Amino acid sequence: MAKKEVAFIGAIDQGTTSTRFIIYDQDTKCIGSHQVEFTQFYPEAGFVNHFPPALFFFSSILIGELICVEFCFMDFGFPVGLTNQRETTLIWSKSTGLPLYNAIVWMDVRTSAICRLEKEFSGGRTHFVDTCGLPISTYFSALKILWLLENVDAVKQAVKTGDALFGTIDTWLIWNLTGGINGGLHVTDVSNASRTMLMNIKTLDWDKATLEALKISPGILPKIVSNSEVIGKIEKGWPITGIPIAGCLGDQHAAMVGQACRKGEAKSTYGTGAFILLNTGEEIVKSKHGLLTTLAYKLGPNAPTNYALEGSIAIAGAAVQWLRDSLGIIKSAKEIEELALKVESAGGVYFVPAFNGLFAPWWRDDARGVCIGITRFTNRSHIARAVLESMCFQVKDVLDSMHKDASQKDGKQKVDGGATVNNLLMQIQADLLGSPVVRPADIETTALGAAYAAGLAIGVWKEGEIFASGGTSKTDTTFRPNLEESLRKKKLESWGKAVERTFDLADLSI
């Protein structure tokens, strides 16, 4: 990229289990960062919340944001890009700024009963696909809003009186950072809006017919903006008053920008879940194999809209956290690689982490986790290796579907996200794909994508500069497959059997 006057760009990366803040220079070199984990709450089976009642005034996320910003921001006058976990749903009071209920996290499945809607509409489960690209599922924000309207009196009353505001986490943070009850901006971006099941993916506006069908008031919805534009400035009360918020993307869309995914290129992000997106350019591609049609990015108010096919996997790195926090098999996430390396294979054990159902390409809300193939030979290392393999099998399933929908052959697979530091995981992925896996030197491409969006908005970079290299460099690490083809096919067949065992288990007695 061309040399410019020294510039700094900040990126707020608000994820499912932590918030981080990273400062980049104009050469995309990280010059400072900080990360804060926050607590997950599981009040019932299938329920996942982020805001405990004791922190009703400010969410743990917002507190984590403040801590990160105070730690990292110095005296640089630079813009901020924001990226966030998607679909997580919050409704709060316009007049008090208080959340009216805990945030319902994207992987939460309390809305399973509301999926009855598929029986009420002529198009069934795919009734809204032509307009919003998404099937009726527990995953998306619209059903979470319906649950809140049906079950929380405070939400119903606030909507009735016009005091309710809805937002995904990007909206919540921007509203608070730009003034909150004193004129905070109520906005979201096209990528986050595309995950609500309420935005028309062609017009990039809230779909009136969908809102009427679901009986959701348009008055609670934020304004939709592009991914790269100056949205507003951070107001008084924060340590960085006056700094412009100049970019906003859902985390997976940000990773696409960070990986410089052009039309026909895909990336896999391994975090709490795993998410595979293929850029289909300005063409909207409808999937016939269980994938989602969504926005990739729109890098400016007048920029073209890039679309994507997406396969979403609910549980990836979260399974490692489960081994650590719930079973105590490991003491830290990084220990899983060493433990799994003590055995040459999973010893016939297959683990399917359908803790809250299965997303793409299965879309089974009734699925629950299974671990099969256990014998007296099985030990902790086999379980650990099976957990790592489960991530890679799921990604393989999604990529197979993606290649069928987009009529593409296997090629190099771009990967990113915290879990990719695990070399064994990346080698297993290459072996199961039967094709190379390319890991960038900077695996935090989600934050980088947010920084790119903010930098584009104020002229630090031009779009052509970001996408010129296709996101690759000499410092990338490539993992090449070394598993025999016959064994690979057998393992994939066994995985398929294990997945089938997870179906229709949601009503098991407790």
Image (cartoon, rainbow, N blue to C red):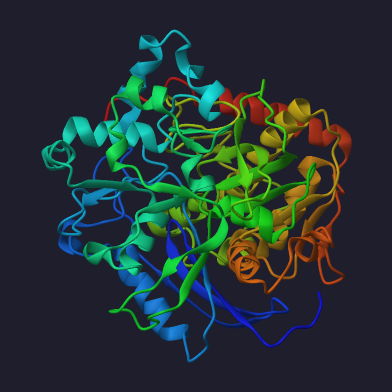
Q: State whether residue 417 is above or below residue 121.
A: below
Q: Is residue 341 visible?
A: no
Q: Seen from this angle, which residue lies furthest front?
A: 302
Q: State whether residue 69 is above or below residue 53.
A: below
Q: Residue at x 28, y 31 (%)?
A: 146
Q: Is residue 401 visible?
A: yes
Q: Nearer the viewer, residue 458 or 468?
A: 458
Q: Nearer the viewer, residue 278 or 7?
A: 7
Q: Residue at x 58, y 60 (%)?
A: 336
Q: Residue at x 21, y 63 (%)?
A: 181
Where's residue 157, x and y in %? 11, 39
Quadrant holding the C terminus: top left
Where's residue 77, x and y in %? 52, 85
Where's residue 370, x and y in %? 49, 34
Quadrant holding the N terminus: bottom right
* Location of residue 259 (image quadrant): bottom right
Where's residue 404, x and y in %? 77, 26
Q: How many marks?
A: 0
Q: Seen from this angle, which residue lies furthest top?
A: 122
Q: State whether residue 68 is above or below residue 182.
A: below
**As drawn, is 218 to the left or to the right of 83?**
left
**As drawn, is 292 to the left or to the right of 468?**
left
